[in-house]
Image: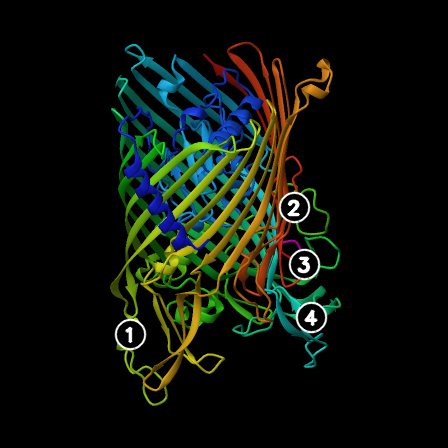
Amino acid sequence: MKMKTLAFAISAALAAAAQAADESLEAAELAVQDGGAVGESEGDTLEEVQVTGILNSIKSAEQIKRQSDNIVDAIVSTDIGKFPDENVAEALQRVPGVSVNRNNGEGQTVTVRGLGGNYNVTTFNGRKLASDNETRDFNYDIIASELINGVTVNKTPQAHLVDGGIGAVIDVTTARPLDIGEFSLAASFRGAYGERTESVDPRASLVVSNTFNDDTLGVLASLAHSSYSNRHDNYFGTGPVARDIDIGNDGSVDIADAVFPSYAGFTLYEDSRERTGGTFAVQWRPSDDIDINFDSLFSKYNIDSHGSQISIPTYSEWWLSAPNGAYTQATVDENNVVQKLAWDSPFLIDLIDIRNPRQSTTYQLGLAVDWDIDDFTFNADISHSRAKNENAGDNRFVVARTGVTAGAFDWGSGNKVPDLVLSDDITPDGTYGGWYSRLDGTGVEDEVSTFVLNGKWHSDGLFTEVLFGLGYTDQGKTRSYFHSTNASIFAADYLDEVLQNVDPSHLVDFYGHLWWELPSEAFQAGDADNFLDGVSGDFPQRWASVDMNKLFSFFEQLDPESAQLLTPVFQPESSYEIREEIAHAYIEGNMEGDLFDMPYYLNMGLRYAQTTTFASGHTQDIDRLQLDASGNPINDDWRHVQPVTNENVYSDLLPSLNFKLSLTDELIVRLAASQVIARPSLYELAPRTSINPVTGANGLKSLSISAGDLEPYTADQFDTALEWYYSDYGTLTFATFYKDVASFIKWEQSITTIDGFDFDTWKPVNQDEKSKIRGVELAWLQTFDPFLPEYLSGFGVQANYTYSDSVSGEKDEDGNNKDFAGMSKDQYNIVAFYEKDRLQARLAYNYRGDYFAGEVWGGSRFVNAFSWMDVSASYRVNDQFTLTAEVTNLQDKLYSSWVYSPSVADNAANYGRRFTVGVRANF
């Protein structure tokens, strides 16, 4: 069915319903929030479950799925302050079709049905929440899991839901005090031991709720704090490129076009993380007709991420005055990929120190008023949220160059991690030279203000319910980028500049390489234990690391004027602000009845959204560029960036249809069709004009230009589901999805002529090619009590499998279809649980198949299949106290990816296990 036809049909049906509505109306009670879940129809009242535990949380989520009007999946915590996973993102990976993306081992963002953050929308209690991520993605790690009581993944849209999500609209919810009712207090304290850091870290939470004035006023407050350290060990092989190998530097090529990484080495990453968050809610119900809710969220999340790296340049960099030794041995496989590579005199080594701090603050304030007037329910909702990641150049990437007499890599051992054998240890008392000292950072500030007014009219006519509403959202995200003026000022290629101020006696000659000699005080011995523990191979276990403060002090003493060039400076050409004003209106109708004696529910809606985008930044001015007869610039005016603002307005009419038919009391079939959008990425919207008047290898000068008139991605999507609730604790569901995605944005190449010279020009444009995403989801829940004797009762399993396929619409250089970035063809989850009397236990296993991760230096990058396993248990001592124990990342599998050849990893890391014990109290 074409979307325009669907839109017209829904419009006509809604108009007919308005004329045919009966004058006798029944009162309806519904608080409709933009982006929140619509209440259930009269026949679909959610069952109230009084017991608590693993199984009840799963069954409550199943009930939400069963009673929903659209296709959803959910996670529920029936005990306040007790969410089923350590992290919200990691909990979401248990949902069919959802994959988690990790940051240093911790779940941070999610992918839904192969679509990442730019294609999903996250709301908090139905309201769009600001994010400290510089893209449209949302960082779930800012929200402590103890603060929430549920997450709903809306896989098919409805007109009242927030637009902008081709993948899904994900709503994170907190509890309301009047729903809890009586006084409730939940507290927890846990200690976690990381086997890599060998430290014990605390985590505590408190949730208090109570009601007053005959249960007409409720107050809920929560607080959670965690402070812990994290470590992961990593091998990297960057930039696999074909190069000629000359054994012995005798001028003859021994192996032509041999492929091997440009840089390879090892990194030990250590994080110190501290998160403090809380919520506060007040609910007042002065009468049966009015419900007033105020709720708020606050989160502060600080990370100090530190990496100590040993990096090996495997070739002689063309800008060096002396070669990187001479190759002494090389072997290749049948694909001409290097298996062994050795060289000497010298074997250059870079010691790299990396600091990437994150200082994130997020808050949201929201006020909602629900008001019943006769046959109508109105909802007014106003909210404001703000997220900020403060970074004014706090990142550090410092390189000191050294070397040993000889060394060798062996990629042919069959392991993801190669052997690296060095002739000498890397200690602080070696010979070191200055090389690269970059200070940079990206500050992000995001503000979202929203006002919506919703209504619902209940009728016993053709349409049993008509929903309508309008709203306005103002969102502005600012990216502020800082960078050193010249991070290489103390490297070999800038010796002449520094020599104007410094005596050459400070130089050291290392095998023909001239460096500014660094003092041994600027280095410290490595202190890591069990590096890449569990991975077989012969590679360094420890190496010297850079003391950044002492290194910068040395540079300041050596040449204060040059050292000033290392100071991070605001870069206006790489900074921008994107502001979007979105006005929306919608109408939605629900029909109920019987079709051949089978109850059905039909939801149809239209949502209109008008988006006005203001993109502000600084760009070079191409009109000021003047070239002489040889093509050289005759002025410098074009180099100075100028402020610029692009404005764009577009509107979308988004129809949606959700149909539910109860074939029996246990069997439900669903059909859904809709048109959805996802707005262009912020990077693509940012003003950008970058001119390079130097002729490149292709004989052309180059030019990069942004586009202020980009349209959103659009998708026609069709979904089906068959849900079989065959027993109280047995469910089997099958779903299919199909998305026909158009208007993808691609950087297109063209030619621009300036003063008679051609410039190779790149500009983002909406493409005519379409991408197709399709797949199936299968989910199963079963307890085994009906099949087991009483003494074996309490066992159950929850499992799901997702198969996805895609056609990206893009071709590689051989004309073959590229995979859709981020999409695994196969992923599955298995949760085995035991729950009886005072004991609960759960084992959760997640598998994500390999996937294409994008283009990098050297070609296409693919991430190998990966699995993650957690196990947890609890024992209820009495009605108030419960003891808990958990192990995360039980298998400690190696996470790896590759470029050019699956036989050689470009990245391989393991994160170590984490053991947690604690106590939870409920009163």
Labels 3 and 2: the sequence-earlier one = 2
Mark 2 residue element: loop
| Residue identified by numbered label 1 | 638
SS label for mark 4: strand
Q: Position of residue 29 (x, y in %)?
A: 33, 25
Q: Amino acid at mark 4?
A: Tyr
- From the viewer's side, name the closer residue of 12 and 660: 12
Q: Can you give x and y, in whole percent of width and height, for residue 405 in the image?
A: 67, 63
Circle nearer the N terminus (4, 2): 4
Q: Of the residues tagged 3 and 4, which is closer to the observer?
A: 3
Marks 3 and 4 in Cβ contact (< 8 Å): no
Spatial CA distance of label 3 from label 1 is: 45 Å
What residue span does the magenta drawing correspond to? 422-426
Residue 128 seen anywhere in this rendered image of the structure? no
Among the two numbered marks 3 and 1 on one chain, the one whose residue lies closer to the N terminus: 1
Q: Is residue 608 above or below residue 438?
A: above
Q: Earlier in the sequence, mark 3 or mark 4?
A: 4
The one nearer the camera, 493 or 604, is 604
Query: Looking at the image, do the residues carrying marks 3 and 2 touch, with CB atoms under 8 Å apart?
Result: no
Q: Amino acid at mark 2?
A: Leu
- The label shown at residue 192 is none
Q: Residue at x 37, y 33 (%)?
A: 125
Q: What residue is shown with label 4?
A: 327
Mark 4 or mark 2, which is nearer to you?
2
Q: Which residue is mark 3?
A: 902
- How far apart in space, not on screen, are marks 3 and 2 (Cα)? 15 Å
Q: Which residue is mark 2?
A: 894
